Image (cartoon, rainbow, N blue to C red):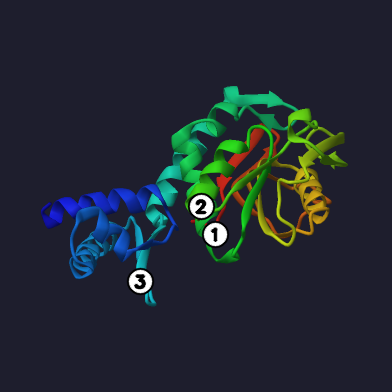
Amino acid sequence: MKRTERACIITQVLTEHPNRDFSLGFFAEKFGCAKSSTSEDLTLVRTAMDSAGLGYVETTSGSKGGVRFVPYITKEESIAGLEKIKAVLEDPSRNVGGGYIYTTDILFDPEMCQICAMQFAKHFAASEADIVVTIETRGIGVAMLTARLLNIPLVVIRREARVSEGSTISINYYSGSSDRVQKMSLAKRAIKPGSKAIIIDDFMRKGGTLKGIEDMLSEFDTKAVGFGAVIVTQGVKDKKIGNFFPIIILTDTEDGYRVAINPDII
């Protein structure tokens, strides 16, 4: 293959497996060439990625020597993508009353989920988390893409225990969104004790679900190192989680609601 052809394939492999280490030997064997040639190919890929602002190609030092692709989204791209989500949410027909808006289609739209996942992956990149945790159902899409970008597993907590999952741990928690006590369950084998977790949810009002997930993780000797929510309502008193990262902030007004992007992103 020509160098440009090898560079295209390397780019595809790296971008399809973000934050995963690949040795120079992996690519050298794949193309049947010397490691020195692969190293030159990677220099070409790295330069192109930097120029386009698509992410970083980091070199792994040591005898094995390798590379990984770290996704990155620029401030301009973040604003453009989130402004699109904001515009969709501002449609008055989405107001379903009671301080809620219809978001299911957004949370299952691949493009919009990717935009949100990129924000979470960037924000939590230095957390050294081992897993991403969410609760069924609407937050699964964003949480899955976040886990993929960080190259760590996703753990999904269920509302009810499933016989097919074997022994489970169940707890009750207070949901501020539904204003009632609910139940969540997780298989005992789902999480390795001593893990560190990022908790992602689709909507946060008082933070009861996020706090419930944190309490569940404590049963597995697992520490929550980050909390993220796609949409957070502002002005609600007595939030149960203090240090959280929102993407969209919702504020109730006399005329309905106001939608804003987290100013830390802008």
Q: CA distance from mark 1 to mark 3?
A: 27 Å
Q: Residue at x 69, y 34 (%)?
A: 136
Q: Earlier in the sequence, mark 1 or mark 3?
A: 3
Q: Nearer the viewer, residue 166 or 70?
A: 166
Instruction: Residue 98 in the image: state x and y as whole percent.
Output: 76, 28
On residue 203, which mark appears? Answer: none
Kind of residue at disc 1? His
Q: Position of residue 40 (x, y in %)?
A: 19, 67
| Residue with the mark numbered 2 | 119
Specify whether 34 is left or right of 193. Answer: left
As drawn, the residue found furthest toward the bottom would be 62
Viewer-nearest of discs 3 and 2:
3
Q: Residues within 10 Å of mark 2 (few under 14, many from 20)?
A: many
Q: Residue at x 61, y 60 (%)?
A: 129
Q: Can residue 58 be seen in this snapshot? A: no
Image position, residue 144 (x, y; %):
55, 42
Give the mark, 3 or 2, whose residue is nearer the N terminus. 3
Up/down of 40 relative to 75, above or below = below
Q: Are marks 2 and 1 in contact (CB under 8 Å)?
A: yes
Relative height, residue 211 to residue 28 (above, below): above
> 55 left or right of 161?
left
* Farthest residue, direction left: 2
SS at circle 3: loop
Q: Residue at x 18, y 66 (%)?
A: 37
Residue designated by label 3: 65
| Pick the front one: 47 or 203 | 47
Q: Mark 1 highlights which residue?
A: 123
Of helix, strand and loop, which one carries label 1? helix
